[in-house]
Image (cartoon, helix red, strand yellow):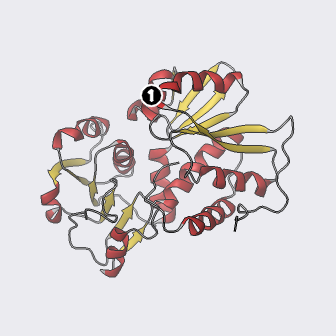
Amino acid sequence: MKREPPGAGAPPLFRGTTRVVGVIGWPVEDSLSPVIHNAAFQALAIDWVYVPLPVPPDAIAEALAGLRALGLVGANVTMPHKTACAELIAGLSEDARLLGAVNTIEVRPEGLFGHNTDAPGFERFLREDAGFDATGRSALMFGAGGAARACALALARSGLAELTVAVREPDRAAALLETVSGFGMRVEVIPFDRAAEAPRNLVLNATPLGGSGEELPLPPLGPGVLAVDLRYRPSPTPFLRRAREAGAAASGGLGLLLQQAALSFRIWTGRRPPMDAMSAAALDELAAMAGGGPSAGP
């Protein structure tokens, strides 16, 4: 049976005045962002709509030019276009420049402006959702890709004392190290097989691992440790299930996605996002999608 979207009664009425935003990616069929943002627009009764914008990798330049021409207000950006957008958009926020990636586009009268809400979204997620104060503490992070770089930047800004980055190939952490080089946070890059030795108040998975296939080489987990998985499907992930069984606190990536969405919503609309409506819509959609593969990002 076809399920009504969260918050749906009568179908939304689109007018000539409806303002349009969306998510650019390839693919975007499984994105939660349309559900989250449209629930927010309905909750505030504003004449906006959020649509998926599937763009193949070789068409991103044309897609960006089309945003302004078609009158869109903005767009989120997900894989594989974040880096390309940072290269193609002239106006960038400080975080977008630091991370070399754009996940939110604002269409301004003078042209496109690229934001990156990954780091501030992670800071808010840790503080408001997970209740974790990073000041003076230690963290173990698996991965050194784009999402990991944003998390490392957020942790450095939050006063983390020591970050251990576990990767298969240490050379791949060079960009991450450069991103956080101006902060006082100590950073050590280690191979996966040394992860169990790392000091940790926080254990963060910023990789696709820990699902149905290869398991993460986790250190001992227990009370006083926060485990975070950037993925939000399945819920909970096997990593988070193991953490909870050991007595650790555990948080999945949905809270991060919602914080990123809230920041994008405020950039576009200038209004306070209705977090309760956004969260309820996302949880309802995830329940309907239960049994699917791992997901992270917009």
Would residue 272 be found to the left or right of residue 209 on screen?
Answer: right
Residue in view at x 82 percent, y 44 percent: 47
Residue in view at x 46 percent, y 40 percent: 79
Residue in view at x 22 percent, y 39 percent: 172
Relative to residue 110, is residue 118 depicted above or below?
Answer: below
Q: Quadrant of the N terminus?
A: bottom right
For the question of whether residue 254 can be seen, the reply is yes
Relative to residue 68, is residue 237 depicted above or below?
Answer: below
For the question of whether residue 108 can be seen, the reply is no
Where is residue 267 drawn, in percent x and y? 64, 39
**Tag count in the figure?**
1
Q: Residues within 10 Å of mark 1 (few under 14, many from 20)?
A: some
Q: Residue 134 versus residue 257: which sits nearer the camera?
A: 257
Where is residue 199 drawn, in percent x and y? 20, 63
Q: Residue 141 versus residue 199: which sits nearer the camera?
A: 141
Q: Which residue is mark 1?
A: 84
Q: Residue furthest front?
A: 1
Would residue 224 be found to the left or right of residue 68 on screen?
Answer: left
Of the residues shown, which amino acid type is indicated by label 1? Ala
| Secondary element type, mark 1 | helix
Where is residue 242 drawn, in percent x and y? 32, 75
